[in-house]
Amino acid sequence: MTTLLPTTTAGSLPKPRWLAQPETLWSPWKLEGQELIAGKRDALRLAVDDQRQAGIDILGDGEQTRQHFVTTFIEHLDGVDFEKRETVRIRNRYDASVPTVIGAVSRPKSVFVDDARFLRAQTDQPIKWTLPGPMTMIDTLYDAHYRSREKLAWEFARILNEEAHELEAAGVDIIQFDEPAFNVFFEEANDWGIATLERAAEGLKAETAVHICYGYGIKANTDWKKTLGAEWRHYEQTFPRLQKSTIDIISLECQNSRVPMDLIELVRGKKVMVGAIDVAIDMIETPEQVADTLRDALRFVDPDKLYPATNCGMAPLSREVARGKLKALGAGAEIIRRELAA
Ligand code: ZN
C-alpha cells in the first residue's frame, strides 16, 4: 500500500431500497432469480461508487451480495441443514433460531469468488473481501454432528482457507475475517480460536485482517454495551496472542467507544484498522472528529501501519447517513495526512 493512512470500511454498506428493505439488518431480498443476480451486481457497483466518491482507498463490495455476514457463507456448505433449526444463545447475548450441523461440513464450490472477480473488474484500487471467522461461524449454528466447538472450528478453518485462496487468485488484496466472537469467548480464543483463524489464513500472499468489534448498532448489542462499565478492556485478553499471530491487520472499534486507546500498544508491529466512525448512531461525524480519533491512535500505532476505518458494518444505517460517514472518514484521514506531511 503506497497511500499513507489508506481508508477502508469494516465491510457492509446499506442496500438500495429496490434490493432489500432499507435500515433493516439481514432483510430478505426484494428480487428473485435473474433479476436478483443483476440487482446485487448493480448494488455492488453503486457501493463502489459511493466509496470512491468519498475518497476511500481500499474498496469493498459493501456486502451487497450477501444477506448475512455469517449465514450466507454457511448456506453454500454441505453438512448444514437450514430446515432443521434450534434456538441458541449468540455470543452469550441474544437467542436466535439457527441451522443444524447434521454431517461432515464441506464446500462443494466457491461461495464469493465470482462476486470478488466482479468487484475486481470495477476498479484498479486495492480491494478487500470479508469472510466470517471460524469461531464466529460455530457460534451461529447448532452442532449435532461434531459435538465439539473446537473440532467444528478447525473444519470451518480448512473450508475458509480454500475460499480465501480462490479470492486471492481472483485479485483480492486483503482478506478479512470477522471474529466478533473473540470479544466474548476469551479463553477459547486463546486456546484454539486464534489458531483456527491462522489456519484459515494459511499460505496466503494477500494481506490478512481480523475484525473484532462490539457488533452492529442493533438493540441487543447497544443494551449489552451498557452493561460493560466505564472501560472496555476485552481486547486486552486476545491482543497479546494476536500480536504473535500470522495475521497482518487487526481491525477494532474506537469511535465513541470505551475501549482505552492504549490497548493498541498490545499489537505493536501489526497494522491496525482503527474504527473512527460510529456505526450505532445516525449523527455524521465531522472530519475533525475523525481526525481526533486517528491522532489519538497514532500515539500507539506507527503512521505507516494505521488504516482509518469504520467501527463495524454500516448495513443498518440509511444510505444518506452512510454516505456522509464515508465522506467524513475520507476527509478526516486527509487532515492527518496533511499534518504528517507538514
Ligand atoms: Zn463488526
Image (cartoon, helix red, strand yellow):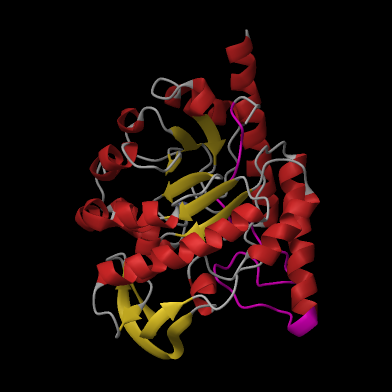
Q: Nearer the viewer, residue 209 or 313?
A: 209
Q: Nearer the viewer, residue 151 or 7?
A: 151
Q: Nearer the viewer, residue 327 or 185?
A: 185
State whether the magenta stretch is mostly helix, strand or loop: loop
* x and y, in percent, of residue 81 in the image: 44, 88
* Residue at 48% across, 36% down: 274
* x and y, in percent, of residue 66 in the image: 61, 68
Quadrant of residue 102 in the image?
bottom left
Quadrant of residue 307 in the image?
top right
Q: Residue furthest bottom?
A: 83
Q: Is residue 323 magenta?
A: no
Q: In the shown orientation, is residue 207 left or right of residue 152?
A: right
Q: Which residues are magenta?
A: 5-34
* x and y, in percent, of residue 323 in the image: 69, 47
The answer to whether residue 97 is above or below residue 240 is below
Which quadrant is the C terminus positioned in?
top right
Q: In the shown orientation, is residue 17 left or right of residue 268?
A: right
Q: In the shown orientation, is residue 134 left or right of residue 191?
A: right
The answer to whether residue 336 is above or below residue 191 is above
The answer to whether residue 13 is above or below residue 306 is below
Q: In the shown orientation, is residue 56 left or right of residue 70?
A: right
Q: Say whether residue 43 is visible.
A: yes
* x and y, in percent, of residue 132 in the image: 47, 61
Q: Is residue 27 magenta?
A: yes
